[in-house]
Image (spheres, grey):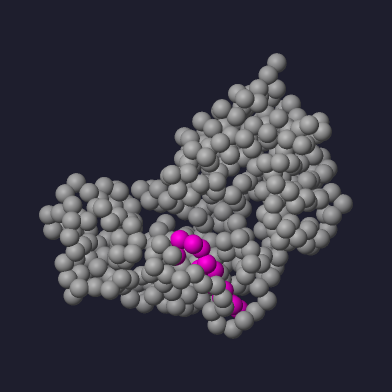
Amino acid sequence: MSAVVTLKKGEGRMLKAGGMWVYDNEIASIAGTFENGDLVAVHDFDGFAMGRGFINTASKIRVRMMTRNAAQEIDSDFIRMRVSNAWNYRKKTVDTDSCRLIFGEADFLPGIVVDKFSDVLVVESLALGIDRMKGMILDAVKEVLAEDGIEIRGVYERSDAKVREQEGMQRFKGFIGAEFDTNVPIVENGVRYLVDVCNGQKTGFFLDQKYNRQAIRRFCKDADVLDCFTHTGSFALNAAAAGAASVLGVDASESGVAQARRNTQLNGVEDRVRFACRDVFELLPELEQQGKRFDVVILDPPAFTKSRSSVKNAVKGYREINLRGMRLVRDGGFLATCSCSHFMTYELFTQTLQQAARSAHRRLRQVEFRTQAPDHPILWAAQESYYLKFYIFQVCEEQ
């Protein structure tokens, strides 16, 4: 018999609305014995069975739910069902050559991410209970893909995020199974990349922007484009593929810029695309002072905040780069700007952009608002699954 976690009266509101987490301060009692990572039953204050999840007393997220069915066995058949559902969803919604195949809570497998880069898998495990099931999940992924004729030649683990320490786990990265060349060639939106799954940021490549990169193409033909926080050059290369006259990509990471230059060579656009290894906050004022102007400016910064406590400072950062970016757009040109922080809410990000526009003396005409690609599904009531906010504006000078 597993232990039983009982909620306090009036708690578990997000769980009851469809969320996946039970926080430590929502729990009235835990009856029975368990080890961290074990599956436990979750009951409401009145004894009503709410499902099963795995527990970890080292984490403020005390229980991560695996099922709402209190009688459900969490075995290999269950895992295979979850994986099969995740894959079938991707086949209907995205280009699956490279995609996020499992997105944690949003695919009802909390705490684990599996990205597919062509015929390579990259796994990131961030919770103790799911870490125990990692091998079973990866076996299920390989089996489900094999049924569609897709053979996986290698698996790499990127469980090196600091958040693992909050779960009482050590950070880890390395091969699972046979070693292989960790520079993996992929094609996305017709653009070729080498993805460094060993040393690249996160799992090696930001798949969540796939269709946002495609969306900026319509504005880039014959345009002068500035791509800030370019990482490995993905927005810059999509601009070039759309026929941009010139593209400048900027990033503070030397390794990222080196990878971006290799990707530029792969696509044969070195004559129109160049990269600079610079701090964007320093470079944008310099470009403004030099009188530089661009037809399209793209701002794709890293998350400036990963906690509620640092949101105020993050707002200052977003306001500053957007103010500077707007001033660099030619009258009637376009700004693509985004935030990938869950804590930078849609409302707060929108308000920050309005403040930046006023300070820059620019008027914004919204072209569209977008979020993350569908292989990063947003599970309603699981707020952490909605993180990417992406705007495209036409920028007009005040006249």
Q: Is residue 112 above or below residue 394?
A: below
Image coords of residue 137 (percent x, y):
44, 73
The quarter of the rendered structure image containing the C terminus is top right
- Residue sitting at x 18%, y 56%: 28
Q: Is residue 192 above or below residue 132?
A: above
**How many numbered discs sit on the rendered protein?**
0
Image coords of residue 308 (percent x, y):
43, 44
Horizontal side of 330 relative to 131 (left or right) equals right
Front-lying residue, 81 or 326: 326
Front-lying residue, 374 or 385: 385
Q: Is residue 251 visible?
A: yes
- Residue sitting at x 48%, y 44%: 310
Horizontal side of 18 relative to 389 (left or right) equals left
- Residue sitting at x 28%, y 70%: 39
Magenta segment includes 155: yes
Q: Is residue 140 visible?
A: no
Query: Which quadrant of the view contains residue 225?
Result: top right
Image coords of residue 362 (percent x, y):
66, 24
Q: Which residues are magenta?
A: 151-164
Horizontal side of 30 relative to 249 (left or right) equals left
Front-lying residue, 111 or 241: 111
Magenta segment includes 281: no
Image coords of residue 185 (percent x, y):
70, 68
Q: Residue furthest left?
A: 46
Q: Residue furthest bottom?
A: 178
Q: Is residue 238 above or below residue 114?
A: above
The quarter of the rendered structure image containing the N terminus is bottom left
- Residue sitting at x 61%, y 53%: 210
Q: Residue furthest top?
A: 399
